[in-house]
Amino acid sequence: MKNGFSRILGRLWFPLTLVALWQIALSSSKNPFFPTPLTILRNTQSVISLDWARTSLLSSLITLFAGYFIGSTLGVVLGAIIGINERVRVVLNPIANFIRSIPSVAKVPVLMALMGIGTATRISAVAVAVLFPVLMASMRAIATTDDQLMDISKIMHYSKYQVLLKVRIPAATGEILAGLHAAVQIAVLVMVISEMLGSGIGLGAFIIHSQSSFMIADMWVGILVLGVIGSILNELFQFAERRIAPWYFKSKELA
């Protein structure tokens, strides 16, 4: 119990110190564009009471989780299929690399031009942004399975299906999880951008509306909520990574 509290305190002391310094530095400031943390927290209560704010939060969460689920599922499945087939990999790897190299935010206007503005477009934008980094991570991890493990699978007379399920995927779990973790940050970014570009709903739209209406404290509340969502997802992924593939992440820490 005490060790757990010490770990939490060790991780929180620096951000809490920054917040305290922020409060002290701006406590006597009249600048409306940089409210104090206490002002933002007080404003959070009034923002939460707004139906539009609650609807925007729900819309953003639906966009984020639906898009991430679709993109990550397709990424892992396609990455595994391409990873075990060298001929397919040689053909598709350059194409996937090229599409991945295009910034995710640059793909959002293209999808809006093709699909219009709506929930389906925002979910698709997140899914496409997540798809390619997860696909590339999965493909590389599956394709570079340790030779010794592959030799053992031959001795055991495994079929291709058994090799994939019993050897390649377990060996690639750590790298696949790392790719899924990295894709979370991309998903949050693209979710916000897709909501800012012409959407009337979502946290991105709420932030833009608050900024253009000079409701600066409300804008900061929206930014704070995004930070909380990102931090929670990051902590959940770190917890899952160390439970599912502890050997991989311990080796990374020691490297």
Image (cartoon, grey):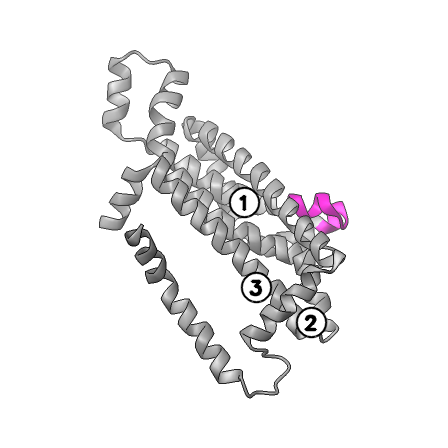
Query: Would you place residue 213 above or below residue 236 in this image?
Result: below
Name the residue beneath numbered marker 3: 224
Which amino acid is tagged 1?
Answer: Val
Q: How dense is the environment of label 2, judged by Cα within 10 Å: few (below 14), some, or many (20 and up)?
A: some
In the visual, does 228 lie left or right of 150?
right
Name the residue beneath numbered marker 2: 211
Residue 61 showing in the rendered view: yes
Q: Residue at x 57, y 64 (%)?
A: 224
Quick check: marks 2 and 1 in contact, CB under 8 Å?
no
Main SS, magenta region, reads helix
Picture coordinates of residue 236 (x, y %)? Answer: 45, 46
In the picture, residue 12 is in which quadrant? bottom left
Identify the mark nearer the N-term, 1 or 3.
1
Q: Nearer the viewer, residue 147 or 224?
A: 224
Local SS, label 1: helix
Q: Residue at x 75, y 48 (%)?
A: 118
Which amino acid is tagged 2?
Answer: Gln
Outermost residue on the top side: it is 157
In the visual, does 69 lie left or right of 111?
left
Local SS, label 2: helix
Q: What are the residue bounds of the magenta stretch?
A: 112-124
The verdict on residue 123 being magenta is yes
Picture coordinates of residue 27 (x, y %)? Answer: 53, 84
Identify the mark nearer the N-term, 3 or 2.
2
In the visual, does 92 lie left or right of 52?
left
Name the residue beneath numbered marker 1: 130
Residue 101 showing in the rendered view: no
Q: CA distance from mark 2 to mark 1?
A: 28 Å
Query: Would you place residue 158 above or below residue 145 in this image?
Result: above
